[in-house]
Amino acid sequence: MDLKEYIRSIPDYPKKGILFRDITTLIKNESAFAETINQIVERSKNYKFDKIAAIESRGFVFASAVSYLLKKPFILLRKKNKLPADTYSVDFELEYGTATIEMHKDSINENDSVLIIDDLIATGGTAKAAAKLIEMSKGNVSTFIFVINLFDLGGCDDLIKNGYKVENLIEFPGH
């Protein structure tokens, strides 16, 4: 199954010049969604990890299903002020702005190995912030798995240059 066929592209969203890759058309198709989850599960078998973390919010869609199937704890990496207990916090730059993500301080134990799942990687700012959260709690990033890599924006290459393992299911140009 060619998962690319299930991704809708929307020009000038959320701002002019951005070509948004919309996963809602993939997840509303039960066969395409199941295939996506199966591919993530298969790729994850190449790595050792204790927990699965996902980046708000679209990463939750994929990671929760993978966590259920692999019977691994699921860690939420959320936008600022969305978690009720003590958090680690990282500010970062996006392709079209700035943001902050947080994680509960008690989510990761020292030396836990964590698989990070998200729907898409562009410049890699969000992914690097996610890795920083894991590392602040003395955990280790096992690998990243992305559904979509916007290859010409360099996020995957940047993660690899920084020593991280990266997998993606499909690729598109960024613009």
Image: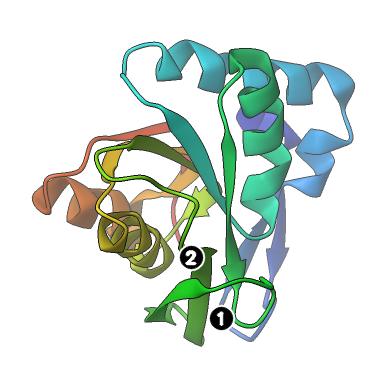
| Dot 1 crowding, Cα within 10 Å, few <14, some 14–19, many 20+ | few
Of mark 1 and mark 2, the one earlier in the sequence is: 1
Tell me: residue 66, above or below residue 90.
above
Quarter-of-image position of residue 85: bottom right
Residue in front for this viewpoint, 159 or 89: 89
Q: Which residue is pictured at 73% across the width and 42% down the height?
A: 61
Q: Looking at the rendered structure, which numbered label has been put on residue 17?
A: 1
Give how far across and how far down residue 28 sits, in percent: 89, 36
Q: Assess whether mark 2 and mark 1 are in contact (beta carbons under 8 angstroms).
A: yes
Q: Element under label 1?
A: loop
Q: Residue 153: image x %, image y %?
A: 34, 62
**What quarter of the picture does the N terminus occupy?**
top right
The one of 65 and 98 positioned closer to us in this rendering: 65
Q: Identify the residue position indicated by label 2 in the image.
A: 175
Q: Position of residue 68 (x, y in %)?
A: 69, 22
**Residue occupying image coordinates x 66% and y 15%:** 69
Identity, as a three-letter code, of the amino acid under mark 1: Gly
Q: Is residue 76 visible?
A: yes
Residue 158 appears left or right of 119:
left
